[in-house]
Image: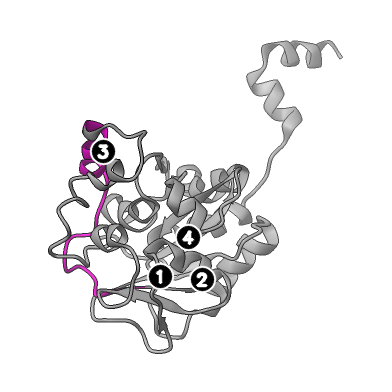
Amino acid sequence: MEALIDVDLKQLNAVLVDDLKVKRPPIAITYCPDGPPPGYEAVDALACTVVRLAEGGRRVYVDAGHHDCWVGQYHLGLLPQPPAYIPSGEYLTMAQGFFTPAAAARNKSQSYSLPVGTIKALAAAPLADVPAGVPVDLLVCICDAQRAMQIAGAASVREGTFPHGELGPSACSSIFAAPYHLQNSVFAIGDGGGRAHNHVAAGDLFVSIPRKHFHYILELVANFRFEPQKMRELIMPSHAAQTKEE
């Protein structure tokens, strides 16, 4: 197992907010195998909305007894015996008309979920206000495509690992479960409900970064250099020829 590089969370938050200019507060997500951390409040809310609630400055968590979405519970592995229409995807056809039964079933079969029993709670807090001693497993940020390219793509320019992109699964699956299984940075459009409940603007998307990639964001900014003129000379034959003539 590769060693994790310690990152100062307040410094990481400052880089995201002050240097990369994200407009919405970055959020720290914690997988809680033994229950919620001290100082976090239970919320009866959809799992995906812990992001928006934490953006408001709160430290919150959902667990088997505090939640308001069977789909979120299923994808977090907190629902050992879900209603059959959840894992089958049938719920996608019961109150809306655009899914076919076959597509709904494939949607759920292709979506990531935490293994049942992996966590007892999922906690969220502002990245700049995580209590001492609370481990952080994911950084989640709602941002525009330009910033998503930089944040989710940080590992790709430092170690060569392309981020994973998702369109179709439930937001809770994409931003909480996919990074766990893939151990990779994820950018996701999110589903209609996840976007609506998190007040995601039309041009924004979710970015979810595992802890092992945190330091790459700092490295990206610390080493950022771009010379447009030089790049054009290197990759554009017409520009290179013009430069030689001058």
Label 3–label 1 contact, CB within 8 A: no
Stretch in magenta: 102-122
Q: Position of residue 204 (x, y in %)?
A: 58, 47
Label 2 and label 3: CA atoms lie apart by 29 Å
User: Which residue is depicted at the point 57% across and 75% down?
Assistant: 128
Q: Judging from the image, what secondary structure is the residue with disc 3 in?
A: helix
Mark 2 or 4, nearer chain start: 2
The residue lying furthest to the bottom in this view is 38
Numbered circle sitting on residue 140? 4
Quadrant (top left/top right/bottom left/bottom right) for the C terminus: top right
Mark 2 or 3, nearer chain start: 2
Write down the residue under mark 1.
45
Label 2–label 1 contact, CB within 8 A: yes
Q: Amino acid at mark 2?
A: Leu
Label 4–label 1 contact, CB within 8 A: no
Circle 3 crowding by C-alpha within 10 Å: few under 14, some 14–19, many from 20: some
